[in-house]
Amino acid sequence: MNDVKSFRKEDVVGKTVIETSGTIRGEVKDVLFDLNGAITIVVEGKDGQDWQVPIRRVTGISDNVIVGSEPTTTATPSGSGASCKFCGASMTPKERWCPSCGRSQT
């Protein structure tokens, strides 16, 4: 059985986009895809400018959309010891939002 959750456009449009560092980047405005299978979310920044985030940078979706830095890493270096206080997922010490469940660590 596959535990990967699927999302509809309606599930993500309007959600706040937050980097794993805790920086609020804006709000999801749209979701784009091309015929090669690439998916991108369009974010309206706090300055009113649109920017595109490749889906590979999205690390979690819950109440917010959490995006990691480029490139997104899924493995935490051995010995870092940081983990989400809610779901237990591995995190780097600098991340303020869980890349797995998307919940704030502060």
Image (cartoon, rainbow, N blue to C red):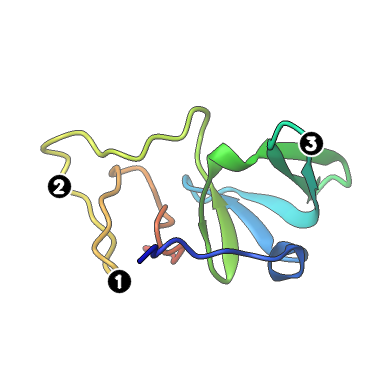
Q: Earlier in the sequence, mark 3 or mark 1?
A: 3
Q: Tell me the quadrant of the picture where the N terminus can be found.
A: bottom left
Task: Identify the amino acid type marked 3.
Answer: Asp
In the rendered structure, find residue 34 and report the number of the disc placed on it: 3
Measuring from the top left, give residue 73's x and y in whole percent. Answer: 38, 35
Q: Tell me the quadrant of the picture where the C terminus can be found.
A: bottom left
**Residue that carries the numbered disc 2 in the rendered image:** 81
Measuring from the top left, give residue 10's x and y in whole percent. Answer: 76, 69
User: For this view, does 101 lie left or right of residue 46?
Assistant: left
Task: State the residue in front, 22 or 17.
Answer: 17
Label 3 sits on a secondary structure element that is loop
Measuring from the top left, give residue 34's x and y in whole percent. Answer: 79, 36
Q: Earlier in the sequence, mark 1 or mark 2?
A: 2
Task: Identify the amino acid type marked 2.
Answer: Gly
Task: From this view, report whether residue 37 is shown above or below residue 14.
Answer: above
- Residue at point 35%, 42% (across, down): 94
In the rendered structure, find residue 29 and report the number of the disc placed on it: none
Cα separation between marks 3 and 2: 39 Å
Q: Residue furthest right?
A: 48
- Residue at point 58%, 71% (across, down): 63
Task: State the residue in front, 96 or 98.
Answer: 98
In the rendered structure, find residue 86 and report the number of the disc placed on it: 1
Q: Residue furthest left?
A: 79
